[in-house]
Image: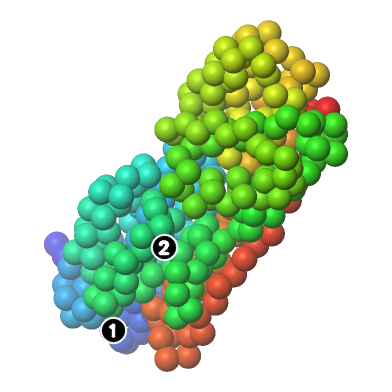
Amino acid sequence: MTVSIKEVAEHAGVSPGTVSNVLNRPDKVAAATRSRVEAAIRELGFVRHGSASTLRAGHSRTIGLSVIDIGNPFFTDVAAGVEDVASELGYAVILGNSAGSRVKEERNLLVLAEQRVRGVLITPSDEDLARLDRLRERGIHVVLVDHPPHRPDQCSVAVNDLAGGRAAVEHLVGRGSERVAYVTGPLTIRQCQDRLAGARLALPAGIEVVEMGAMNARAGEQAAAKLVASGELPDAVFCANDLLALGMLRGLLQAGVRVPEQVSLVGYDDIDFASASAVSLTSIRQPTYQLGKVATELLLDECDNPVTHAHQQIMFQPELIVRESTR
């Protein structure tokens, strides 16, 4: 039989309104009372009627997270930060993976709007962000993740990719590299563009650009094959992310190219696999979990406190982590 809020309230010795607050605004309830109500919910097996509460409130206790590539550990770590904060504040997270496709991203955003989510955290698939304004017009709050601000009245959390690209190539030049190749995914992706711009600041004489259709290890191996087949290897390779770099490392080693003796290699993101590869990878570290955590805090503050909320555009600084792959 269905357990009611009234039954939970009687079991916990509180009012039905307190149970409702625990379900919808847990931060408004004293910790001891909240624990007592949550225990009653577990003991009685109460399950809230999500669609009914959404209709009453006009929105849900749900937010959306749209990322470019959930297969990339970078976004897995971001999602962990998002989920931890959302769960603590009584929200659920719906994850959408655009796979870098504008069409798929728009379809995912439509589903989120149909679900009446309170807000959306998004790493956009391209730079045309008018679709995000349409979400805002529907009353859905939007925070950009790993992307600079789109407009002053919107929150964003990003990492300074220009500084990251510059630090990577300055490190290579400081170690004696003169010919540097930049292996990247599609340059329509803002992060790829900014990391290249930073690399060019560090080496004005020019960077050889190898643009691939994807940003995974397979694309990195294919890029390595291209460089080896050219017959003229660069002194160093800077990759737009660690998955590309790990594929590049594998491809070079299989071709008999010694890393870092013949070719130095730098990745970007400092995922866990970077330090565990056959030749540990020098990489640019980003505060991935922190990106997700801070972005979610900003979004939920805007959702729950729209009158007092102050929009913020936060820019984190990346960090160079030196390992065996650079001589």
Badge 1: how crowded within 10 Å, few (<14), some, or many (20+)? Answer: some
Q: What residue is disc 1 on? A: 16
Residue type at mark 1? Pro
Left or right position of 280 against 118: right
Give the residue type at disc 2: Leu
Near-viewer residue (285 or 208) = 208
Residue at 36% x, 60% y is 128
Q: Nearer the viewer, mark 1 or mark 2?
A: 2
Asked where in the image residue 235 lies, by quadrant, the reply is top right
Residue 119, image x, y percentages: 35, 69
Give the answer, above or below, for where 75 lies relative to 132.
above
Residue positioned 43% across, 85% down in the render = 305
Tag 1's secondary structure?
helix
Work out whether residue 215 can be spotted: no
* Front residue of this view, candidates 301 and 250: 250
The residue that label 2 is drawn on is: 121
Is residue 125 visible to the viewer in this orientation of the structure?
A: yes
Residue 156: image location, x then y, percent: 51, 68
Gap between marks 1 and 2, in whole Å?
33 Å
Marker count (numbered)? 2
Q: Position of residue 242 (x, y in %)?
A: 60, 36
Q: Quadrant of the C terminus?
A: top right
